[in-house]
Amino acid sequence: MPALVNYSGDDEFYSGGSIYSMDSSLLLSIASHVDVYCPPRKRSRISAPFVFRGHEFEEKKPSIEVLPDECLFEIFRRLSAGQERSACACVSKHWLMLLSSVRNSEICKSTGSQGGSALNKVYESSNDIEMISGDGDQELESDGYLTRCLEGKKATDIRLAAIAVGTSSRGGLGKLSIRGSNSNRGVTNLGLSAIARGCPSLRVLSLWNVPSIGDGGLLEIARECHLLEKLDLCQCPLISNKGLMAIAEKCPNLTALTIESCSKIGNESLQAIGRCCPKLQSITLRDCPLVGDQGVASLFSSASPVLTKVKLQALKISDFSLAVIGHYGKAVVNLILGGLQNVSERGFWVMGNAQGLQRLASLTITSCRGTTDVSLEAIGKGCLNLKQMCLRKCYFVSDDGLVAFTKAARSLESLQLEECNRITQSGILGALSNCGSKLKSLSLVKCMGIKDLAFETPMLSPCNSLRSLSIRCCPGFGSVSLAMVGKLCPQLHHIDLSGLYGITDTGLLPLLESCEAGLVKVNLSGCLNLTDEVVVTLARLHGGTLEVLNLDGCRKITDASLVAIADNSSCTQ
């Protein structure tokens, strides 16, 4: 008969071995707490990992736990099946981290049949990805490979190790994105190294606001992930030139690089990128205080012939860098420049006159005091294929510069002006007249210099190519200006006049009547002074083509407008 144990005390009691082998004093000391019945001449069949030493109990450790890490490592690297590795990783954090330290190339691939594996039979119904599932991260299929995104407190070394182990049997991750990290147990080099060892097929790595990752983690990525194509580093204060140079030297397939607010990355790493990455197509540099003319000049002078997209913002570069870009940027198609406070008018002028940006199709300039009338005209003359131009907060550009630019840029199709407060009504009309054959889209946002003035204008050429007109939050743009624009642009399809509380029916009606092609999308939100007459006319003239109409905030619109829309249009949203 098996032993019967009835335990009711507070102290722990562990059964095991024969009761007759106990010391009598020990037995008496626990008699008040335990009632024990044991059949004579029979040894208890209850076994437990404890032995008696004197008057104390000592726990026996399982034999597998006393093995050194070196032995466990050799055992783990011989587990080739993903389910077996995932099952072992679930035992403890210690085993998980040991498994994550095994490089993918060190795993012994089994050549025999795996159908007889005991672990495969036990866990054949389980999915090894369940081990790393969580609420805060996502697993997606992107471009044919696994994608993983961790945000905030879910981003830890343990989770990265689990991802590396759980996905290694399926080829590993193709894309990893980390946005922030746990404040107490944030991602460090240890977690990133686990990804590098378990996911050598990693192609896209994005690290945002991970202050605990340094060169060590990036060195491991460079050592193992030679297929890396895209690298995005933002607010990584511990990553320096050493880590990025290793990426440049070990990852020749790099096509896109973004570095933002990384205080230790400077010119040396950019030189290595230009020298070692012949496939680089896109580069973004923003708010990196150690990046200067030397790095940018070296990057462009030795840049790959496929470097098409460049974005430089808040850098301490001078006129020299823009001169180099103008000369060597022969492949650049998209160029974004912002916050370059040390670049003067001369820098932009040289960039335009260098005649190297022949393929440039899109140019965006924001908050650059070197953008003036003279430099803008030089850009128009030097960039013959420029199709899209965006100027934001360029306070030194006036009507003269805008008109000269539109006259020189004969391929211009889209023009966007935002907070360019020296641009007036005259400049807008002159620009439209100069771009009569190509310009398809005009957008004005918060241009406070535009005033609604009625004056005699010379005979202006119509802009028959313009299809989209967007004038938003320009309080000085009123009915007179709108009527003038309407006469110049008879082929409009899309109109956005949101926030123009100064316009009235008198200004908008001529525009509606002059649109010959038929309006498709109209946004009049915030136009407080418009009445039912405008909506009725719009429905009557363009009801057959109108698809979207926004009247949000138009207080004078009544049910009569809705009836007119219902009667004249069947597809208005």
Image (cartoon, rainbow, N blue to C red):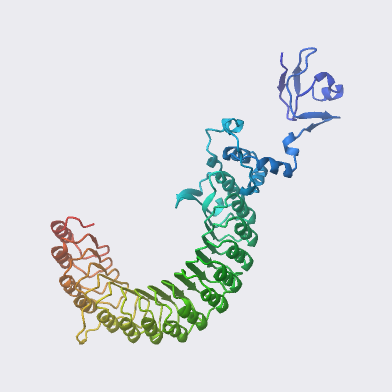
- Residue placed furthest toward the front: 111
Locate residue 188: give its quadrant. Answer: bottom right
Tell which of 58 and 137 is nearer to you: 137
Residue sitting nearer the eye, 444 or 122: 122
Q: Measured along the vertical axis of the image, is residue 295 above or below residue 164? A: below
Residue 11 percent coordinates (x, y): 75, 30
Numbered label tally: 0
Q: Is residue 441 visible in the rendered structure shown here? A: yes
Q: Residue at x 29, y 81 (%)?
A: 431
Classify residue 274 by image quadrant.
Answer: bottom right
Quarter of the image that includes the C terminus: bottom left
Image coordinates for residue 266, horizontal then vertical, percent: 59, 72
Frontmost residue, 446 versus 561: 446
> In the picture, residue 473 is in which quadrant?
bottom left
In the rendered structure, the answer to whether residue 569 lies left or right of residue 223 reads left
Report whether 441 appears left or right of 565: right
Vertical placement of residue 204 versus 529, above or below: above
The foreground one among 209 and 228 is 228
* Quarter of the image where the N terminus is located: top right
**Percent x, y of residue 511:** 19, 73
Residue 476 pos. (x, y %):
29, 78
